[in-house]
Image (tube, rainbow, N blue to C red):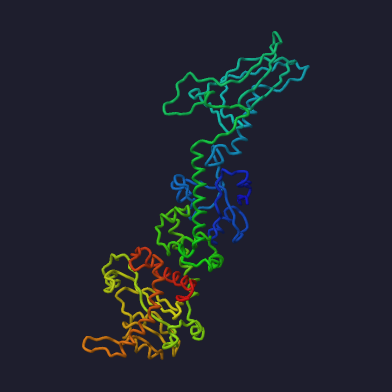
Amino acid sequence: MAKQCFFVGCDNNSTNNPEKLFLTVPQKVDRRKLWFEAVGRTYIPGKSLYCCEDHFDLEKDAENWIHFKLMGTRLMLKDNVVPRNIVRKETSSQFTPTSRKCKMETQQHSRGLRRKLFPEPTVPGTSQDVTEDVEDLQLKTVASPSGMFVSAKSPEKSVSPLRTKRRTLRKATQTRVSTKDQSSMTSVEVADKSTNTLRSLSSQIYQSPHKPIQGSSTSLSSSSLSLQSGSVYEPSSESLHETNMMISKELLVKVEIFKIENNSRFYLGLPKSEFFFIKLLQEELEVPVEHIYIVLKKIRTDDQFVRLGTDFALSTSGVSNIFSKTLPKMATKLNELIFWPEKSKIQRVLPRQFQTYYKNVEAIIDCFEIQVERPSAAYQQALTWSNYKTCNTCKYLVSSTPNGLINFISEGFGGRTSDVEIIKQSGYLTVVPENATVMTDRGFKQVAGLFQKKKVNLVRPPSVTSTRKMTKDEVRLSKLVAALRIHIERLIRRIREFRMLGPHATTDHNLVPLLDHIVIVACGLINLQGPLIQ
């Protein structure tokens, strides 16, 4: 569908002006209203509209003008820029001199020159002599059908002035103008006052006797410039290169989307059978599907923003902004997939290993840690230091059903925070229902009192001390609980498949504030992957 400029009084569109750049009207309500107010139109929400380049000074209005010219990335305007009427001195297009407006101006100028050179025929019977003296007439701009230009403003240029001798036309003189080509040949028949014979005058292009300016590579000789009426426009190698670059980038984006959609589990962490969820997410967030792909691929593969920008033909800063703005919205929607199901539904899909001894278990809890960059402040270093991982980490409490459905994920805590403090501050005790049975590791022995107050049964291996030897029953119970707790370890392994949540991912300090959103998105996608044991 053709893009039509929404500026009042502007008829530019992508069909008649394919060389022009059309910028999308912002979807954000505040900026969109400013644009509509600037052009004097009634506000229309949601609809995709465009504004052509004629209403911007892109060198000043664009945020990434140099990068756009060099790399061909998507052009981004500054926040305070609105479309406006801009008077162009030379051409209406900022990218090509062969715009329609320029051609019309040159055609009108050429017709004016012909009127001065060859006046209209005089009416017989008049006694006045029409005398016209045309000296040192300089061709300014002549446009040929092939789109090329001949410019001869001054004698220093490659085209010398066209000189015409003084001619006197009688009252009976009839002038016939026969034009073969607007830019290459003009044939004129003029009556001589003495002999009344016709002479043929033709406009020719002469080489200037002056030497060209050094460094100028412009040559308008007949051997290098063809102005025949049947000539075909051949674009320059530079324009061909830019066109090929744009086509290559569009092709790369299509290939990248094709790879993602055909192997979504690897690139996004979403099974192909659940790929319809992307469409639902796009409708809820009202963002392009490419933005969703960028966020999910970043979390899944932990690719650098530079590489993601190359894959999606965007700038590095643009990809970073998309990630930081889209991620919180996506986390809000995916957080709805993390919930505590009813006990009857949990027991309906209970794995066979739990049905014999622990069929009442509704949740298994454990903690996992993610390494982050070492903070610059000593206080933050102390809060995030983990003796278990021997590095600076963020710590999360995760709870899942025996079948592998995540029913709770806490916010991030410093690596030095104990399990008891995380249970208290995370709000897990307010989520777990009364009389439920929760299975934990041996390290959660100090939280038994907290669960008893909530009337929650706690199943964990017996404590081990160096002064007392374990009995046979305690050893048997430890092995049984450890064999069942392996399900939470498998779930954490699924979380680790998202490379940004790896044990030694070393999250950048700029992304640490977004780490909670990243964990929520990963856990929501894991709940769409199906049960741990088929």
- Residue 78: percent from left, percent from top: 47, 53
Front one among 476 and 230: 476
Front one among 423 and 270: 270
Residue extending farthest to the right is 125
| Residue occupying the point 33% across, 68% down | 371
Q: Is residue 472 above or below residue 236?
A: below
- Residue 174: percent from left, percent from top: 73, 18
| Residue occupying the point 36% across, 88% down | 450
Question: Relative to residue 132, is residue 234 drawn left or right?
Answer: left
- Res. 162 image quadrant: top right
Q: Is residue 293 above or below residue 221?
A: below
Residue extending farthest to the left is 467
How many numbered marks have been drawn onto this rendered protein structure?
0
Q: Is residue 486 above or below residue 19?
A: below
Front one among 488 and 372: 488
Residue extending farthest to the top is 195
- Residue 412: percent from left, percent from top: 37, 73
- Residue 193: percent from left, percent from top: 69, 11
Front one among 347 and 291: 347
